[in-house]
Amino acid sequence: MKMRILMLFGLLFLFPSLTQSQPERILNKFLGSKLTPGDLRVLQLDMNPDPVRENQRVGFYATLSNLSKFSGRVDLFILDRDEMVATAHDVFLRPGDNRISFPLSDYRFSRKDHCFTVEVDIEKTRRPIDVAREFCARKAFQGWTMTAPRIGPLFVEDLDMIPDPVSPGQDIRFRARLRNDGSPIRVDLLIQDRDQIVTKLNDTLLLHGTSEFLFPFTRYQFQRFDHCFTVVVDVERTPYRVDAAREFCAKPYGWSLRP
């Protein structure tokens, strides 16, 4: 190893122009060490603007952790499934955390959500990089965003059935009046009886203020002594139970939700 270091300094003394031509590559190659994809991890992935509207150009920013003691120059790629989103070439990664800015992209956001992965090319070998968490852009009221959704506060002001009371074997539908004291948000709305889903309303926009929602008809079987219903909002596959003004329970004498 000492002999290699002496030879390296000798080359740099004889050919000083090498010090201006990616010296970290020369050092790593000469000492028999290099950066590998397993040394890297994506800690954070953001975009600007956020939210981004359809047909609007967007820039991505990534924070990469280099867990090794070696530096290196790499090419980086952001993908949505197999589709290329953005690329950054000849990026110099130092040990520790590195903030990477990708050039503006014309990537088209079209689906309900887009989940991104990051790949690295080191010396013509391309591999995916481990991520600290899932990085997804979801469709929101003003475009697509990667920020965590802000929910509510939400409140169930009223819940009733049509018809009411319900006869055995009869098709029914639920009507819910919800108040959203927070920002507009897209959710799936569910009516549940304990852990059983009774009916569902997909891709619903909860505007700020009070809104009324009419659910599809369902032939729900009333068979226990009582059935108590709750309203649940599902945001990015995470359910949240909504607080209510009172309990909404149907009793066996006529199966009614009326107080």
Image (cartoon, helix red, strand yellow):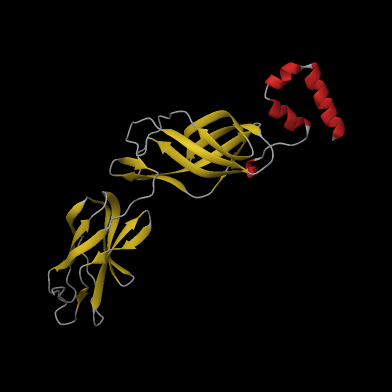
Q: Is residue 83 visible?
A: no
Residue 241 at x, y percent in the picture: 31, 64
* Residue 248 falls left or right of residue 70: left
In front: 195, or 242? 242
Q: Residue at x 33, y 51 (%)?
A: 150
Residue 75 picture quarter: top right
Above or below — where is 140 with respect to 74? below
In what quadrant of the picture does the N terminus appear?
top right
Residue 127 at x, y percent in the picture: 60, 40
Residue 227 picture quarter: bottom left
* Residue 217 falls left or right of residue 80: left
Residue 250 picture quarter: bottom left
Above or below — where is 7 with respect to 76? above
* Residue 28 falls left or right of residue 215: right
Above or below — where is 174 with respect to 58? below
In front: 229, or 44? 44
Q: Is residue 148 visible?
A: yes
In front: 54, or 243? 243
Q: Residue at x 23, y 54 (%)?
A: 181
Residue 31 at x, y percent in the picture: 78, 33
Residue 236 at x, y percent in the picture: 37, 53
